[in-house]
Amino acid sequence: MHEVLPFIISKINYFIYIILMMLGMYGIFMKKNYMKKIIGLNILQTSIILFFISIGAKNNATLPILELQNDHDANVAIQAVNYINPLPHVLMLTAIVVAVATLGVALAMVIKIYKDYKTIEEDKILFQTAEDTIENE
Amino acid sequence: MGQQLPVIIIIVPLIASLVISFIGWRYKRFTFFLAITALFVCLISSVSLFGIVLNQGDMQYHMGGWMPPMGIEYKVDHLAVFMLVLISFLGFLTAVYSKKIVEKEMPDKVFLFWCLYLLLITGLLGIIVTGDLFNLFVLLEVASLTGYSLVAVGNKRATVAGFRYLIIGTIGACFYLLGVGYLYIATGTLNMGELAQLLPAIYESKTVITSFVFIFIGFAIKIALFPLHAWQPDAYTHAPSAVSIIISTAVAKTFIYALIRIIFSVYTINFIKTVLPVFNIICWIAAMAIIVGSVYAIVQDNLKRMLAYSSIANVGYIVLGIGLAASTSLGLTPVIMHLLNHAIIKSAMFMVACGFIYKFNLWNISDFTGLSRKMPYSALVLIIASLAMIGLPPGAGFVSKWYLILAVIDAGQYPFVAVIFISTLLMLVYFWRIIETMYIKPPNEPENKFDQQTPVEVQELPGSMLIPSVIMAALTFIIGLVWISGMLNPFLNTLNLNFGLGVIQ
């Protein structure tokens, strides 16, 4: 036990991301309500954003803004180890935009489904489509 | 000018789609003209890029002048340029075909359709030329999101199908993004060329192996590989006609291309050979996809649904080719052949299937009686495409099956020969049903029942829909002849050599 706990704490970001991802997957697969499915999908995407953000972090590092830029002291070498890695953050800005666009399209579809079927419960919709198929035949 | 072509191919449809979304509601007639011009520019640029790459070799374009690995690199090699020509050609011809059908099926949304359609083509062409993993993700999502919304435009079942496609497709994209994250942790770069140089030192690392698994599963969802195909039949069946043509051909093929690109350009063949001998498993999954897809296709009565299941089987053929690539001297040749052949044949078939729906609202094969006399040319196109698919020499399907069998024998995996033969027999069964219903069975209408000789009024599709499908049907056999003549063998050899695979003897 006294070895497991430090291991978990030292990699706490990865554990949280896995837990969140599984929560999201659970929501997508097990919930019948389409809105809840969308919420699950969003949790899944957020977990990946958390994962990316956390891999850019470093101990004892600061924001990636050069401190000595205006000091005419250009001889001081810039140490990469003093700054956190900004690239994953920038990537995640784009990923957030993609997630928002996905959410928008999904919500628009749910609105259209509600207009057509008067419900957003998956089992009721499947029941209605089955009835429609029988009527057509 | 030639140096700018990789970016022109993407910028032109992107800007055209923006312009359409701004002015389309006011100048409705202008939209189709603008869309078709943009697609034609894409086609011309792709063809001229093909010539440049054939003569001068690979081509790089650095976005905004930033050198990789800092900036985004666009890279066009032999495989990419082949796919560019294929996708822009399919996009152009499908657009010509779709004009009338879109005006009939969604009269008040025509300009929105063309806006999304051009965005879809932008995403697809971008996936092909990009040399950056994260840029690939963004363009993948551009193509997928427009695909979801285009599917959902149709009737009320299409919306549910589109929603399920969105949920499952987004899970696939998330898996891909996660795999990219693992690769980034391991190497600190996202550029494909640089990854291929950095990865060999750390092939054994568990991070790299996990990333491969994540990326493969992500793309397996996107290309509807057998156990993960649940979204595909509904989406293809209920989507509006124009959309089911482009989604079943261009979109599916581009995602397969992206999978090939990542396996062979980023991880390279050495990774598969030395660290993760996963190709055997992939072959068996593909064999299952071939059999299951064909069996499901037999029991369908809805023509579009049958074609959708047939697509699952054909994705199996392509993935089987990928799985064999490492252990045969043919390399990726069967894969490239079937990518082209299946795209052409399937688009001809979907064009005819959507034509039946456009003209008489006929969805089910059992209602097709007497169609050979009402729509003789469309019926003929469907027959030619089916024969090419089943494998009548010198049809396109015959060539790809022939090379696939050669590859299987070369690799010594004899069970797959049986799989290919069984699936051909099953194909014969489900395509013969269409031929029988259209040509042999007497029509159901009582006035025609006893009098087969009365001339039936011919009600063909309009020219703008008939000509593209006839071109596709002719191409199925022309392409077969081109493959057999060996005209493209030097091209295929260079393509295989780029990935370190074997050459055709």
Image (cartoon, rainbow, N blue to C red):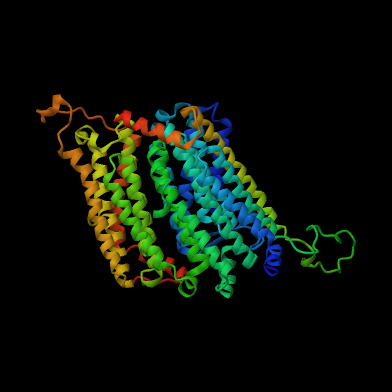
Q: Which residue lies furthest to the top in this view?
A: B447
Q: In this view, does B288 lie to the left or right of B119?
A: left
The answer to whether residue B391 of the structure is visible from this angle is no
Q: In this view, does B113 lie above or below B250?
A: above
Q: Which of B155 and B81 is in front in this view?
A: B155
Coordinates of residue B434 in the picture (x, y in percent): 23, 42
Quadrant housing residue B22: top right
Coordinates of residue A136 in the picture (x, y in percent): 31, 29
The structure residue drawn at horizontal position 35% and vertical position 56%, both measured from the top left corner, is B289
The structure residue drawn at horizontal position 42% and vertical position 34%, both measured from the top left corner, is B157
Quadrant housing residue B492: bottom left
The answer to whether residue B283 of the structure is visible from this angle is yes
Q: In this view, does B172 lie above or below B487?
A: above
Coordinates of residue B101 in the picture (x, y in percent): 39, 32
* Quarter of the figure that contains the C terminus of chain B: bottom left
Q: Nearer the viewer, residue B3 or B337?
A: B337
The structure residue drawn at horizontal position 22% and vertical position 30%, both measured from the top left corner, is B458
Q: Count the marks.
A: 0
Coordinates of residue B10 in the picture (x, y in percent): 54, 48
Q: In this view, does B373 lie to the left or right of B347?
A: left
Q: Is residue A95 left or right of residue B119?
A: right
Q: Nearer the viewer, residue B270 or B156?
A: B156
